[in-house]
Amino acid sequence: MSLQRLTKQIFDRFDKRIVEATNGTVIPPSFVAGLIANESGRDRQGSIVEAATRFEPHVYRHLINVRDGRRSSYNKLTRADLAGASDAAIRALATSWGITQIMGWHVVRNLRCTVADLRDPAKHLFYTVKLLQLNGFPAGANEDRMDREMREWNTGSETGKTYHANYVPNARTVRSLYRQLEKTRVSRVVGERVSLDDIASVSTDDAGHEVDVSAVFAGLTDDEIILDLPQMQEVCSPDDLVLGGHVSNEFVPEDKVVDAPPKEDSTKKATTVTVLGFAVPTFLVAIVTAIRDAVREGFVDARDIGNAVVGFISANQRYVFYGLALVVVGMMLKKLYKQVTLWLSMWIAARPDLHNVNVRPQ
């Protein structure tokens, strides 16, 4: 999708909300439009999906280490901030949310809200503006300063290296295009500017006490809290898609886990008997053991059994060979089927050349 079409979509769909969120602040609506252009998830048709999320495995590991006392802090979050947080809760904090992809960990100290608030389209851009103000967005910022603010949003530093080489230039282009569209804007009817204190009060008590981690996830169901890795990236932008065998510079690998095929019911118990490298089912081992015991105790003659087996094989060599061949081929096909399904599972979870895929044994 061209930047012109993307900017037009942002203006048509989100301009009213952008104006409401930036009203009474020093932040230009065009800057927020540039953020949305860079950060929003889009489907294959290029339509922005407001519910898009992105899981950040490295952030998850850092937060887990802070919670468990192996690291003192991460982005000013300490062990006390994360005490009692479940792995699912930490996963939500390590996920970015909405059309400007606000990281979940901001809700604890910076935004004083809930993950549900970040997911609310009516509130999301207000928190975007609040974060920009907390970062010190200056009044009357020129294009160069806005470039630095854009870079800080993506990397945490005004001089950081963005995941995508065109991140900052694209935002500058979108800002220019958006300002042209603003000239055609019908007067927006917006309410009185909502103060940051009013926004924060959504999830703080009347005394203004900080929220604890358990309150961060208010409004989420258990199914929404427990987020499986393959579901975290609900959508991706065209730049994140793998097209023509090339991967975008913005792409961030993830750790994927795939379950190995379960063992056959007949071979769950350990056995050392193998035929051509295949484990012999335990019921056959039991039959052989029973015959051996019967011979040992004198109930049957081993010579008679041997002669009967040899005679049967001699009289039916072709059928015995076919039968053994079918058994071996059947076992090989079964193992091949399980291996193929494992490969398919790995492919469905993630392209092996794009992600770290770990197979969990059964």
Image (spheres, rainbow, N blue to C red):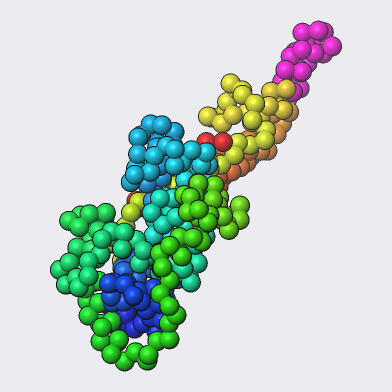
- The image shows residue 199, relative to residue 315, as above or below, that is below
Residue 46 quadrant = bottom left
Give the dominant element type of the magenta stretch: helix, strand or loop.
Answer: helix
- Most extreme residue toward the right is 299
- The image shows residue 231, relative to residue 213, as above or below, that is below
Quadrant of the snapshot with the N terminus: bottom left
Tell me residue 55's x, y (percent). 42, 53
- The image shows residue 138, relative to residue 231, as above or below, that is below
Tell me residue 203's x, y (percent). 51, 57
Residue at 25 percent of width and 71 percent of height = 171
Q: Which residues are magenta?
A: 287-308
Nearer the observer, 71 or 305: 71
Tell me residue 205's x, y (percent). 53, 54
Residue at 34 percent of width and 61 percent of height = 131
Quadrant of the snapshot with the C terminus: top right
Asked whether residue 81 is in view, the answer is: yes
Residue at 61 percent of width and 23 percent of height = 271
Residue 22 quadrant = bottom left
- Most extreme residue toward the front is 207
Residue at 81 percent of width and 7 percent of height = 297
Residue 322 quadrant = top right
Nearer the observer, 74 or 322: 74
Count of marks, rendered view: 0
Asked whether residue 235 is in view, the answer is: no
Q: Is residue 40 left or right of residue 119?
A: left
- Most extreme residue toward the top is 297
Q: Is residue 29 left or right of residue 206?
A: left
Tell me residue 215's x, y (percent). 54, 50
Nearer the observer, 163 or 147: 147
Nearer the observer, 164 or 17: 17
Q: Is residue 237 magenta?
A: no
